[in-house]
Amino acid sequence: MDEIKGIKCEVKNCVYHNLEDCCMAGQIKVGSRQATKTADTKCETFECNQSTGSDMGC
């Protein structure tokens, strides 16, 4: 997987997150179609990394 340049990701329990806070998904999909403010958006590419060993859970 390659880093998506310019995409910063702080979701440490995502399988596409790397230690430099970069997204390694190759491509991402962001929703929702009805967003009117930042809080209404989300990364639809997120996949939980259950092997992170953190207490963030999935």
Image (cartoon, grey):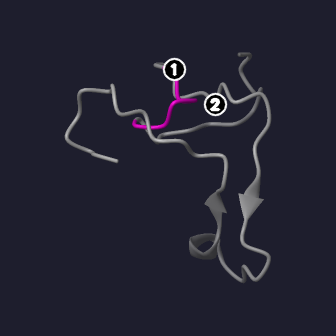
Q: Nearer the viewer, residue 19 or 31?
A: 31
Q: How many marks?
A: 2
- Queried whether the magenta region covers residue 14, the answer comes back as yes
Read off the residue under disc 2.
Answer: 23
Q: Residue at x 71, y 16 (%)?
A: 1
Q: Is residue 35 above or below residue 7?
A: below
Quarter of the image for residue 25 reads top right
Picture layout, residue 25 above or below residue 18: below
Give the Cα separation between the discs numbered 2 and 1. 9 Å
Classify mark 1: residues with Cα within 10 Å, few (<14), some (14-19) or many (20+).
few
| Residue found at x 23% / y 33% | 54
Q: Dot 1: what SS?
A: loop
Q: Which residue is mark 1?
A: 20
* Mark 2 or 1: the one toward you: 2
Q: Which residues are magenta?
A: 13-18
The answer to whether marks 2 and 1 mark residues whose Cβ atoms lie closer than 8 Å is: no
* Image-based side of 49 in relation to 34, left or right: left
Instruction: Find residue 26 and report its horizontal and vertical position in percent.
Output: 77, 28
In x, y percent, where is residue 12?
41, 35
Q: Main secondary structure of the magenta part?
A: loop
- Identify the residue shown where x is 77% and y is 51%: 29
Residue type (three-letter) at the residue carrying disc 2? Cys
Residue 52, labelled with which disc?
A: none
- The amino acid on which the numbered mark 1 sits, given as a three-letter code, is Glu
Q: Is residue 45 left or right of residue 46?
A: right
Q: Is residue 29 left or right of residue 52?
A: right
Q: Kindly state the secondary structure of the residue where label 2 is placed.
A: loop
Q: Hey, which quadrant is residue 43 in on the image? A: bottom right
